[in-house]
Amino acid sequence: MKKAKLLLPLILLFGIPVMGQVEHAATPEQCRADANDWDIPGVAVFDANTIAFANLPATLVHNPTVTAKMLESRIVELNQCIKTDSLQAGRYSQGSRAYSIAELSRMGDFMGRHSLQGQFYQEDEQGKR
């Protein structure tokens, strides 16, 4: 629960500015190919309760080959894909959410390892946002 409270401000801090940083529009074909490569469940099998999708954020958090910058880049692309490929917009939306959760979880872990939660809460109480 404590981690969830920490993640909400980070979502607002990093999630909103990311939306406007897309450099190019991916084609529907590119969106689908990347979503497949990134193991985002397909539309035909998509169900928020499936094990494959439910495990995606945890898999990403501990994946040593996917850096935080890669997570961020994929979030940006998936958010663009929502607009470019409306047939699979739900897939990209859920994928973006999973990638955001993974990125924010890594940020929370970083804050924990460096004892930054206290400073975060103190500054937040002071209205620094």
Image (cartoon, rainbow, N blue to C red):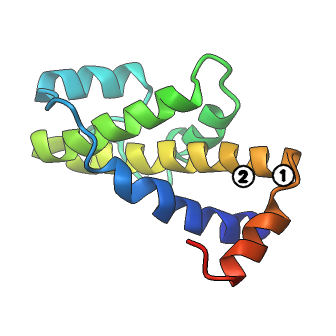
Q: Residue at x 14, y 32 (%)?
A: 25
Q: Rounded to the nearest whole Å, what is the CA distance between mark 2 and mark 1?
A: 6 Å
- What kind of element bears circle 1? helix
In the rendered view of the protein, which quadrant contains the C terminus? bottom right
Determine which quarter of the picture holds residue 33: top left
In the rendered view of the protein, which quadrant contains the N terminus? bottom right
Tell me whether the residue at label 2 lies in contact with that at label 1, contact meaning CB atoms closer than 8 angstroms. yes
**Amino acid marked by disc 2:** Gly
Above or below 97: residue 80: above
Left or right of 115? Residue 42 is left
Left or right of 58? Residue 48 is left
Give the camera-side residue of 54 and 119: 119
Query: Residue 38, position in %: x, y?
Result: 43, 25
Above or below 32: residue 43: below
Determine which quarter of the picture holds residue 126: bottom right
Which label is found at residue 108?
A: 2
